[in-house]
Image: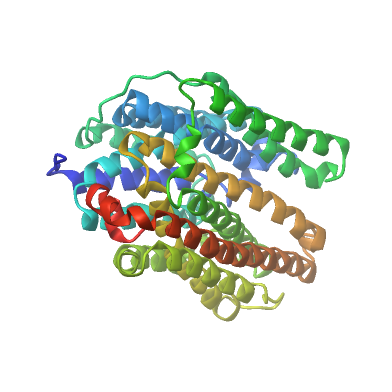
Amino acid sequence: MPTVSPRRWWALAVLATAQFMVIMDTSIIGVALPEMQKDLGFSQGELQWVFNAYVIAFGGLLLLGGRLSDLLGARRVFTAGWTVLIGGSIIAAAAQTAWVEVVGRAVQGVGGALIAPAAMTLLMTLFAHDPRELGKAMALYGAAAPAGGTAGVFLGGVFTEWLSWPWVFVIYVPIGVATLAATGLLPAVAPRRGAIDVLGAAAVTAGLALAVFAVVRAPEIGWGSTQTVLELLGAATLLALFFVIQRTVRQPLMPLGIWRVPRLGSANLAMALLGAAWIPMWYFLNLYLQQVLGYGAFASGAALLPMTVLLMVFMTAITARLLARFGAKPLIGGGLLVLALGLVWLSAVEPSGSFVVDVLPASLVAALGMSLAYIPAMMAAMSGAPQEQAGLASGIVNTTYQIGSALGLAALTALATSQGAGRLGDLPALTEGFSAAFTAAAVIAAVGGLITLLMMRTEKSAATAHQEQSERTEPSEQVGV
């Protein structure tokens, strides 16, 4: 019988704060980018690397972070991750040149890649004793991610308009120090013996980074250019090499047998497509508010608060109950389809539109879809993995979400630009470009919902023969995932 920590809910507050801050780090710089460009001398093409340096380091190293969490102990890796994140934040805040800023953002991403899988392992350790508590804890923890992404836009506007852009990084220092001081609340998960697959880690990190790099640069140099084609082929080769390495080394970074876990594959597909639809949505919605409706940085962030409130309330109070009653499959598939509906509604934005008519109702529908799908997909990906591979499973599902987000944003930015979103000051052209991005994101979400429903049904059928036995041995199965 696992030991029940009397301080587990305080520990959850520490873990949820970490999740909130790590995901907020991908969005808080959005509103601050114009000021950073002016002060640090970024060109228009280079400016995107303030965002992508973080995402590439974060997404590319999550698998390694999960493995380190399993081998070295989750609390130790969690602590190390916050130390690295604080260091990266100081570098980014103090940067006087563009390249130092990019380095600081990459260091922040390394810290996030250590924190995220370690936090998930600690959460599972704290609440695995009771499936009801686990569902509630996952709801609170899961709500911190999309709330962090949306709140980052709002706080970025506050800091940029009333203070200065370095404050979007300075904020991480006191919060990080407070988090480090509270790590005594977290359980000491024992490390396990094993080796680190350095070659595999290098291959998958380089492959994912090169793939994102190629997609981000393709709109500038051409999708059919020799450089883009070679970069994409190089990324595919590195990722293929990674899988070859995983089949041949004694202690792989990602044992391929983990993909036999029921629902892991379909849940990861759902997370990738969810990120590819959701992150571009709030990105282009923020641009529409500022560049078409004329909102300032603070007003634009405030306009996204209703989505944040809905996400927090729905995820913490309702999603866990729906998950226990209906299971993961209908919530993931249905959530993605509801998100698609909200995005179709947003695609009807007008140059002379208004927040109340064109943005608020559609954004709330989209947020409802996100709140339905995110936690069930996360739990479906984690629930079947053995405890010693919890960090690995968390690393995989976080990687798919982050890489899906980065690739989706890069591709839809290229689409929006080709449809007129690059013509600053031309409101009809801007609106047409943003509308095209919303439409494409809706297609991604809708296709993801349909495919995930079909795939998860197949996986559930394959696991039915073992369900009754696993309900007694795997507490997380009892919440309907």
Vertical relation: 324 (above or below) 252? below
Residue lying farthest to the left in this orientation: 6
Vertical relation: 163 (above or below) 242? below
Residue 258 visible in the shown view = yes
Which picture quadrant has residue 479? bottom left
Horizontal arrangement in the rendering, residue 382 relative to residue 321 (left or right): right
Residue lying farthest to the front in this orientation: 465
Vertical relation: 312 (above or below) 84? below
Quarter the N terminus occupies? top left
Horizontal arrangement in the rendering, residue 284 relative to residue 164 (left or right): right
Q: Tell me which residue sits at (40%, 57%) in the image.
A: 375
Report x, y in % for residue 416: 75, 60
Horizontal arrangement in the rendering, residue 80 relative to residue 34 (left or right): left
Q: Nearer the viewer, residue 479 or 225?
A: 479
Q: Nearer the viewer, residue 392 or 11?
A: 392
Report x, y in % for residue 120: 35, 42
Residue 140 visible in the shown view = no
Q: How is the image coloured?
A: rainbow
Q: Tell me which residue sits at (42%, 41%) in the image.
A: 394
Q: Nearer the viewer, residue 217 or 467?
A: 467
